[in-house]
Amino acid sequence: MATAPLVVTRSDGVSWSFDAVTRYARDLRARTTDHPVELGTSISDTVIREPGRDTPLATVTRSPLEGRTYDQPTGKEREDAAVEFLEGCWGLSLTLAYPEEEIDSYVLVSMSHERGAYRSLRFSLAFREVVVVEAQTVTIPVTQAAETAADGLASEVDAGEQSGATPDMSEAEEEAASSWLYQLIYGSEQEEAS
């Protein structure tokens, strides 16, 4: 049996073999954190790898070459089955198998198709790598409690004897307190208290 140019396998075990891949691109990128400095340039201190992106242009024909049906239907049913398979890929982890390599943990992020010559469908696909991480909690034992900033300080401070009487107002303060603006802000209670 011939090897298909692209086999997409879903995490539920269902797979689809395409008849041809006429164009294929893999995009691997990274970005850096930049910090400006006084010299009119910036320095980079960290590189962050972004998920990979594969964009094949794959074809499904109604009448594949002999021996290349890959146990899939023929005729119009073959095209319909390919569309149905790809629509079922949304949200599932995928494995992409090319003749030279196999890559795991991809998801379908874009799909469009157009009718091609010789009764075929051409699919423009975009797959994006999914980077899976696991959280882990580590318990660090404390051997000795750290001293706090308040250790050794008095809980109260004696400020000495304080006067409880209201200080006398100066002549200017009494005049300000009797103004209409002062009365609007503080009301007549201030006047009664003094």
Image (tube, rainbow, N blue to C red):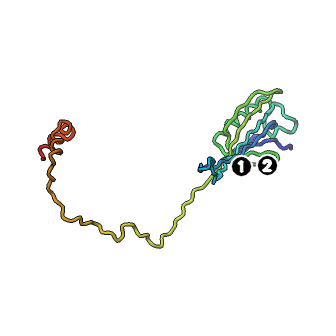
Q: Left of 27 or right of it: where is 194?
A: left
Q: Quadrant of the N terminus?
A: top right
Q: Which mark is residue 121?
A: none
* Residue 127 in picture, x, y percent from top left: 70, 41
Above/below status of 126 relative to 133: above
Confirm whether residue 132 shows in the render: yes
Q: Determine the secondary structure under disc 2.
A: loop
* Residue 56 in picture, x, y percent from top left: 76, 38
Question: Looking at the image, which residue sits at the far right?
Answer: 66
In the image shown, does 182 or 79 lie closer to the viewer?
Answer: 182
In the image shown, does 97 or 29 lie closer to the viewer?
Answer: 29
In the image shown, does 171 or 145 lie closer to the viewer?
Answer: 171
Q: What separation in Å lies between label 2 and label 1 (alpha carbons)?
A: 10 Å
Question: Looking at the image, which residue sits at the far bottom?
Answer: 143
Q: Determine the secondary structure under disc 1.
A: strand
Above/below status of 113 relative to 6: above
Which residue was labeled with disc 1?
104
Density class for disc 1 (Cα within 10 Å; few <14, some 14-19, many ≥20) is: few
Which residue was labeled with disc 2?
101
Above/below status of 152 relative to 41: below
Q: Quadrant of residue 182?
A: top left
Residue at screen point 30% across, 69% down: 154
Confirm whether residue 19 shows in the render: no
Q: Are marks 2 and 1 in contact (CB under 8 Å)?
A: no
Kind of residue at badge 2:
Glu
Q: Quadrant of residue 6?
A: top right
* Residue 160 in picture, x, y percent from top left: 21, 65
In the image shown, does 103 or 171 lie closer to the viewer?
Answer: 171
Kind of residue at badge 1:
Asp
Q: Left of 111 or right of it: where is 116?
A: right
